[in-house]
Amino acid sequence: MGTIDVHTHYVPNGWPDLGEGLPWLKVESEREAVIMVGDSKFRRIQDDCWNAEVRLKHMEEDGVEIQVVSPTPVFFGYDLPGGQAEKISRIFNDLALEICAPAPDQLLPFCQVPLQDTDAACRELERCLEAGHVGVEIGNHVGDQDLDSEGIVTFLQHAASLGAPVFVHPWDMPFSPRLDRWMARWLTGMPAETHLSIIAMILGGVFDRVDDSLKICFAHGGGSFAFWLGRFENAWTMRHDLIGTSEHPPSHYLDRFSVDSVVFDPAALRTLVDVLGPTQVMTGSDYPYPLGERPVGAVVKNAEFLDDTTKRLLLVDNARKFLGR
């Protein structure tokens, strides 16, 4: 049984004009392009972002049976009017289906939604599930609204009612001169954003309000959450007057969410498994981007502290439960 990779991304090899200052693709060859945002270069990409044949070849090399293929967050458009963001979501969601069409049993598309407009987000999720998407990827915040904002909670309740798995990806990280060096926004900002999102789900009472049928996974190992759970638990107890806003202490909610395995280091993976439990970690790679893991699942497969049964949970079984397959 091959690995299931729950964290990969796609970029189409072209799309209609979205409007001034919005993302567009500068095509340099059949295999290379640059994502542009207005006049600025965002990321250089290759055809593994859109070419199913290339993806399938890499999957075979790495022993991956199934990929979850999610949007690249730069296309979310959460800062736009809801109607405009809904149109953009429809464009990319339909293109995602085309990218995955050559191998529908192996390439499973996750859609994006205009999360700033709850009704539109719910409407687009329904449309996409009917069209063939398997789940939805959302950003970890909309402007200054965390995942415990009323509109996002309503969307999560709707996703739970539809049985749609939700993958949460950090995006739109803070920036400053100190974070503009060494890709520091990616090295520190992404883990911090993800950590904050999980805190918001707990202290914002989301897990208390949303049915436990919600299937939700956080990217990049859940950021720094597992390492700092003890600090979180201590703060909830010692400063209950300020942060005792959830019905239960933070450790009570560990079975309500999953994380992927994109932590690269066996010691970090061990922390995830020890703290969250072996049923809450799934293999992810962040393919095809340079900060991803290749071969996919290497940190899990090479972890000497995991027995074969636990490795199978992390490589296959947990993802099958998450995806309902």
Image (cartoon, grey):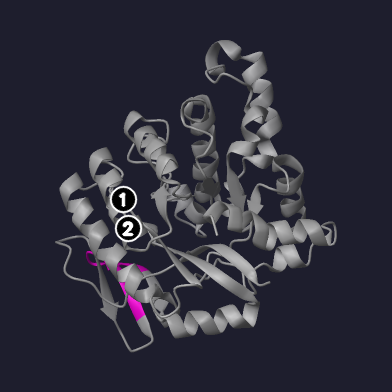
| Residue 81 visible to an observer of this rendering | no
Residue type at mark 2 is Glu
Q: Residue furthest top?
A: 241
How far from the left and from the top, in percent, is residue 103? 45, 78
**Boundaries of the magenta span:** 33-42
Q: Secondary structure at mark 2?
A: helix
Q: Residue at x 39, y 41 (%)?
A: 141
Along the line of sight, which residue is nearer the eye, 201 or 230? 201
- Label placed on residue 224: none
Residue identifier under label 2:
130
Give the left or right position of residue 241, taking residue 116 as reference.
right
Q: Residue at x 46, y 26 (%)?
A: 209
Residue identifier under label 1:
126
| Residue 27 visible to an observer of this rendering | yes
The local crowd at label 2, few if under 14, some if 14 to 19, many if 20 or more residues have their Cα within 10 Å, is few
Residue type at mark 1 is Glu
Give the left or right position of residue 261, taking residue 95 as reference.
right
Q: Residue at x 60, y 57 (%)?
A: 319
Label 1–label 2 contact, CB within 8 A: yes
How far from the left and from the top, in percent, is residue 202? 54, 29
Above or below residue 142? Residue 15 is: below
Above or below residue 293? Residue 77 is: above
How far from the left and from the top, in percent, is residue 288? 50, 72
Give the left or right position of residue 77, taking residue 81 as reference.
right
Residue 108 lies in the magenta stretch: no
Q: Residue at x 31, y 78 (%)?
A: 13
Above or below residue 260? Residue 155 is: above
